[in-house]
Amino acid sequence: DVFCGFLLCTNLTRAPRIGQLQGEVIPTSFYHQGRVIDCSGAHVVLDDDTDVGYVEDGTPCGPSMMCLDRKCLQIQALNMSSCPLDSKGKVCSGHGVCSNEATCICNFTWAGTDCSIRDPVRNPHPPKDEGPKGPSATNLIIGSIAGAILVAAIVLGGTGWGFKNVKKRRFDPTQQGPI
């Protein structure tokens, strides 16, 4: 049950620095990274009845075990439905964890109620094949203006040249032909 409460593993004292001790201090030891670590667990209650050592029901406290009323219990002993198992007996197909609501929470690239469906990460923005680019709107506007100026220059130039020749024929007696 020590996993279903708050553990103190440093600055250990017999009495809590804040709040009131409820029950007794329970010493425990863990083997972690080649060392034995001594810890203590206890329920310490503050003035507003908040338990500093509170661990929520459903918190995992061992393999196929969870906390309920500050006790570490086998899930099967709770007479609850557990998460689905695969053909090899692995919970959530070995690709997720079982929640306290007996549903699988799948790892990042797995899906389904039992985490058995491979769900690879997809690129949300696939690269676009841009292909040949057409003219931009700015280029079209500039081209249209330049074309209009060129047409106007040709029309005005042709008109001016035509008037010059007509005037010349009127006043030039050497030119023959109908006017």
Image (spheres, helix red, strand yellow):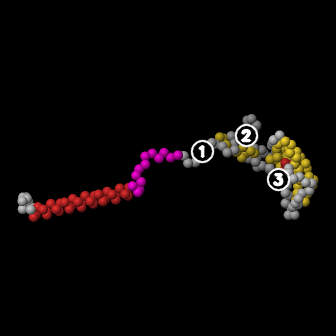
Q: Is residue 151 left or right of residue 117?
A: left
Asked if disc 3 and disc 1 are in contact, CB closer than 8 Å, the reply is no
Identify the residue at horizontal 76%, vertical 49% (top origin): 101
- In terms of image quadrants, where is residue 43? bottom right
Evaluate whether residue 135 shows in this view: yes
Residue indicated by mark 2: 94
Label number found at residue 55? 3
Kindly identify the amino acid type of the residue bearing the numbered disc 1.
Answer: Arg
Q: CA distance from mark 3 to mark 1?
A: 37 Å
Quarter of the image for residue 52 reads bottom right
Q: Reply above or below: 110 against 8.
A: above
Of callouts 1 and 2, which one flags the residue occurring earlier in the amino acid sequence?
2
Between 27 and 101, the one lying in front of the other is 27
Disc on the earlier residue, 3 or 1: 3
Residue identifier under label 1: 122
Q: Mark 3 belongs to which amino acid? A: Val
Q: Main secondary structure of the magenta part?
A: loop
Q: Secondary structure at mark 2?
A: helix
The residue drawn where x is 10% and y is 64% is: 171
- Front position in the image: 63 or 19: 19
Look at 28% across and 58% down and name the residue there. Answer: 151
Mark 2 packing: few (<14 Cα in 10 Å), some, or many (20+)?
some
Q: Position of residue 136 (x, y in %)?
A: 42, 54
Label 1 to label 2, Cα distance in Å? Answer: 22 Å
Q: Is residue 95 magenta?
A: no
Which of the two marks, 1 or 2, is nearer to us in this view? 1
Q: Nearer the viewer, residue 56 or 101?
A: 56
Instruction: State the residue at coordinates (54%, 46%).
Output: 126
Q: Is residue 41 left or right of residue 175?
A: right
Task: State which region is magenta.
Answer: 127-139
Does the magenta segment cover residue 131?
yes
Q: Amino acid at mark 2?
A: Gly
